[in-house]
Amino acid sequence: MAEKDKVYKCLNPQGIQETIDLFPLAPRLDTIDGKEIWISECGEPDVNIALEKRLKSDYPDVDWKVKKTYQTNAIQLTEEEMKTADAVIQSVAW
């Protein structure tokens, strides 16, 4: 094989960007009193205990719901939970 016949193959160092779906931000709530707010946690256990206690004590009129997992992937709320939720606090900790 002659020097000029060599073919080099390489990958783009930037990688291949996959397309993602974009969604606009949800409108802000005028008040959180009487609302249903989900706290969805994933990652290290017990990292957000202080935050959860503080939110519940500072905002007792809010219907707080908590969903936890200690795996690497985030928890998805079910369709029914998404329909009834007024807001979600998603936290990820390693």
Image (cartoon, rainbow, N blue to C red):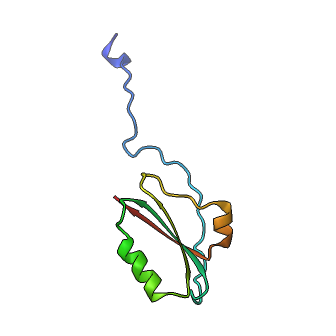
Q: Outermost residue, top direction? A: 1
Q: Residue at x 46, y 52 (%)?
A: 73
Above or below, comparing residue 51 to residue 42 in the picture: below
Above or below, comparing residue 24 to residue 33 in the picture: above
Marker count (numbered): 0
Say whether residue 62 is left or right of residue 46. right
Q: Quadrant of residue 93?
A: bottom left
Please state the horizontal and vertical placement of residue 38, each as a whole percent of the image: 54, 71
Please state the horizontal and vertical placement of residue 26, each as a whole percent of the image: 60, 75
Q: Residue at x 39, y 28 (%)?
A: 9
89 or 9, nearer to the observer: 89
Q: Quadrant of residue 42?
A: bottom left
Q: Residue at x 39, y 46 (%)?
A: 14
Please state the horizontal and vertical placement of residue 76, each as a whole percent of the image: 56, 58
Q: Residue at x 36, y 76 (%)?
A: 50
Where, quadrant-wise, is the C terminus in this rendering? bottom left
Q: Outermost residue, left direction? A: 3
Say whether residue 92 is left or right of residue 81. left
83 or 64, nearer to the observer: 64
Above or below, comparing residue 26 to residue 4 in the picture: below
Where, quadrant-wise, is the N terminus in this rendering? top left
Please state the horizontal and vertical placement of residue 55, each as a whole percent of the image: 44, 82
